[in-house]
Image (cartoon, rainbow, N blue to C red):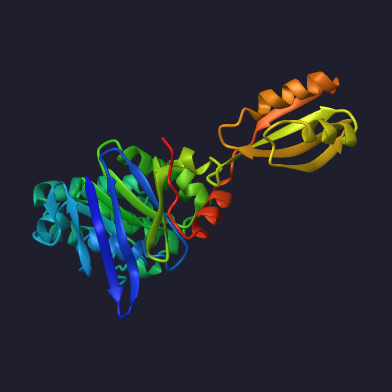
């Protein structure tokens, strides 16, 4: 488990990370979201012990990073930002060198290297000089390096950057498979990636943690409203009249009209039984209601809403 408590990193007068707290348990795949410069990589470097925090504390498996960073680092597979590699070594040579540094027993080393080469789909370039490999292959060599010692905690900074679509799909599947026995924290600015593989999302903006919740929570309208798409088999005016007389509606926007059906997007306060009220009003006015669909908030909308607020979003249980 990763436990982060009140973490701060200050550069001069500026807080790159400001009082951030969260936990990540075994089996979790937690996505660290945020725009460039939000503090994601800085936080990851403090978790891994490569950067000393100004204040606050980090524990991995109950061990404080500040008190025993060597033990903590041995329990982490870390894929850092920009993935530094020895480009004059061949892939297999590099992984052998890294496995030795990580303490992988010599008798088991060759087998483990072959396992990670296969898992990360880099067997075909195993004997190629790293500097001649594509960006996608170099990224996967870095992921193989992180997995060599089979650490219980994986910290992955932008693990799919530079990969082609097929490689992205494979890497996401591999990360989901690894989560069964590992704790996984990954950073990304790719919103669909969070939806594809993460069980939880953390949103960091200007060094502050603004959101900590499930991916399903992100699809709620966090502004406190719920939205419904409704369609009337009637004129636009008749539909507008029904909406105007329905209790609880805050806003209604016309969307389109096709084959005699007029569609509107309706907003109402969360918890309002707006669908039931609208159904009753349509029945009373004899206006056929042919569509009534709750609308999910897109991840892009949720992200923009959260990162433009002045205060963190509170997720309701």
The answer to whether residue 28 is visible is: yes
- Classify residue 220 as left or right of residue 120: right
Position in image of residue 8 (x %, y %): 27, 65
Q: Quadrant of the C terminus?
A: top left
Give residue 157's quadrant in the image: bottom left
- Outermost residue toward the bottom? 12
The image quadrant that residue 225 belongs to is top right
Is 188 displayed left or right of 298 in the figure?
left
Residue 218 location (% of width, % of height): 49, 44
> Residue 19, percent across and down?
30, 61
The residue under the point 20% across, 48% down is 151
Q: Is residue 126 visible in the rendered structure shown here?
A: no
Q: Is residue 268 above or below residue 151?
A: above
Compared to 179, does 290 lie above or below?
A: above
* Quadrant (top left/top right/bottom left/bottom right) for the N terminus: top left
Q: Is residue 83 left or right of residue 238?
A: left
Give the camera-side residue of 226 and 215.
226
Q: Position of residue 316 (x, y in %)?
A: 43, 38
Residue drawn at the location 12% of the way across and 51% of the way down = 63
Tell which of 250 and 198 is nearer to you.
250
Residue 213 placement, left or right of 232: left
């Amino acid at each position: 488990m990763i436990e982060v408590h009140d973490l701060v990193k200050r550069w001069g007068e500026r807080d790159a990370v400001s009082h951030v707290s969260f936990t990540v348990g075994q089996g979790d795949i937690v996505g660290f979201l945020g725009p460039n410069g939000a503090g994601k990589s800085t936080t990851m470097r403090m978790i891994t012990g490569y950067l000393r925090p100004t204040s606050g504390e980090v524990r991995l498996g109950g061990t404080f990073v500040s008190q025993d960073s060597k033990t903590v680092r041995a329990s982490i597979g870390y894929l850092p930002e920009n993935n530094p590699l020895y480009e004059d070594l061949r892939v297999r040579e590099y992984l052998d060198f890294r496995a030795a540094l990580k303490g992988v027993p010599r008798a088991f080393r060759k087998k483990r290297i072959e396992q990670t080469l296969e898992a990360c789909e880099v067997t075909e370039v195993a004997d190629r000089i790293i500097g001649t490999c594509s960006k996608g292959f170099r990224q996967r060599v870095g992921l193989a390096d992180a997995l060599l010692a089979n650490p219980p905690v994986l910290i992955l900074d932008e693990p799919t950057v530079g990969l082609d679509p097929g490689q992205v799909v494979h890497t996401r599947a591999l990360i989901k498979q690894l989560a069964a026995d590992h704790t996984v924290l990954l950073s990304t600015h790719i919103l669909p990636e969070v939806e594809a593989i993460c069980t939880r999302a953390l949103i960091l903006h200007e060094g502050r943690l603004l959101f900590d919740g499930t991916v399903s929570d992100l699809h709620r309208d966090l502004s406190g409203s719920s939205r419904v798409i409704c369609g009337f088999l009637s004129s636009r005016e008749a539909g507008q009249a029904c909406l105007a007389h329905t209790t609880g509606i805050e806003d209604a926007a016309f969307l389109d009209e096709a084959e005699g059906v007029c569609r509107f997007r309706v907003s109402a306060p969360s918890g309002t039984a707006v669908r039931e009220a609208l159904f009753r009003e349509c029945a009373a006015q004899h206006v056929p209601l042919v569509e009534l669909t709750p609308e999910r908030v897109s991840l892009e909308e949720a992200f923009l809403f959260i990162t433009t607020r002045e205060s963190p979003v509170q997720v309701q249980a």
